[in-house]
Amino acid sequence: MKIVLLTLVILFTQAVPSFAQCKLKNICAMMQKMDHFSILNACPGSAPLLKECRNVSEEGLPKLPTPEFIDNGDGTITDKVNNLRWFKKGSEKRWTLKDANAFANNESFAGSSEWRVPTLPELQTLLYPEKVVNASGKKSWINPIFELSRAHYFWSTTTCDQVSFIEENYQGKHQKKTCQKGKAAAWLVLFKVGSTLWFLTKDAKHRVWLVQNIQ
């Protein structure tokens, strides 16, 4: 009898540390590295905590007015409607979002040093409703006044705690995409196929399409 009781005590004390790590803050941390099934396997009964960690916004993505672009002839494009000036083409080098912001802050081009990484609503104004030949001579889902020749992802500064879901028409098909990573992830646009998606910001390296406000 004593042996049985001792065995039960040992088993119980070994199980406690595992479930002691299944509090809300632990579950939220796991979501940055693990999928939901793995978390539920490690922490049975944690579904309600997963819901609390999702950071899903009730607001959809704000849309900017339809742009009107003009080629300035100096490697930049002006959007007269939204008062923005863009690089005519995106960067060739890849950065994490943090390094992309640093690059933008130090960039000087076309007589200005006030460049920045765009928000997602701004970046999406470059999307075109059909696949057409752009200024590079290649086809993509970007407004043809811009230059894009390869399938690159481009950062926005919009993180998943700001916008947790988007709805888009991907090549003529309606899609809803959700991101539950909070500040750990940000939205990007892949103009080659006309799609918006998200990546974790800490390690992922992608290109950037710089923009600036104008009067």
Image (spheres, rainbow, N blue to C red):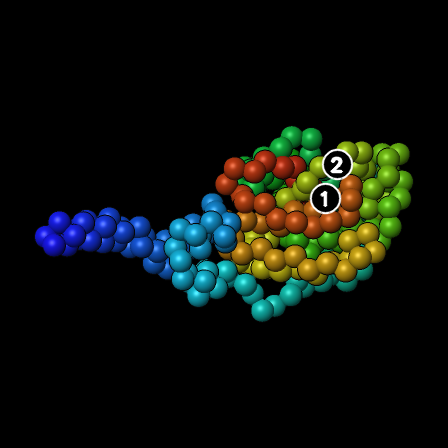
Q: SS at mark 2?
A: loop
Q: Amino acid at mark 2?
A: Ala
Horizontal and vertical percent position of residue 162: 56, 59
Q: Dot 1 surroundings within 10 Å: few (below 14), some, or many (20 or more)? A: many
**Which numbered circle lies on residue 190?**
1
Residue 10: image location, x then y, percent: 19, 49
Q: Is residue 177 left or right of residue 160?
A: right
Please tell me whether residue 79 is drawn above or below residue 91 in the rendered image: below
Looking at the rendering, in which quadrant would you find the N terminus?
bottom left
Observer-nearest residue: 167 or 96?
Answer: 167
Image coordinates for residue 71, horizontal then vertical, percent: 84, 43
- Mark 1 and mark 2 lie on one chain; the one further toward the N terminus is 2
At horizontal 65% and vertical 57% (from top left) the residue drawn is: 177
Question: On residue 151, which mark appears?
Answer: 2
Extreme residue in the top direction: 93
Q: What residue is rendered at 40% in x and 51% in y? A: 42
Q: Give the position of the C terminus as an image quadrant.
A: bottom right
Alpha carbon of mark 1 to alpha carbon of mark 2: how far?
7 Å
Instruction: Identify which residue, 213 or 150, lies in the foreground.
Output: 150
Residue at (31% x, 50% y) in the render: 18
Is 31 on the left or on the right of 89, as rendered?
A: left
Q: How dense is the environment of label 2, judged by Cα within 10 Å: few (below 14), some, or many (20 and up)?
A: few
Mark 1 vs 2: CB contact within 8 A: yes
The answer to whether residue 143 is left or right of residue 7 is right
Q: Residue at x 56, y 65 (%)?
A: 57
Does the image show residue 70? no
Q: Which amino acid type corresponds to the residue marked 1 in the rendered image?
A: Leu
* Residue 117: quarter of image: top right
- How many labels were placed on the picture? 2
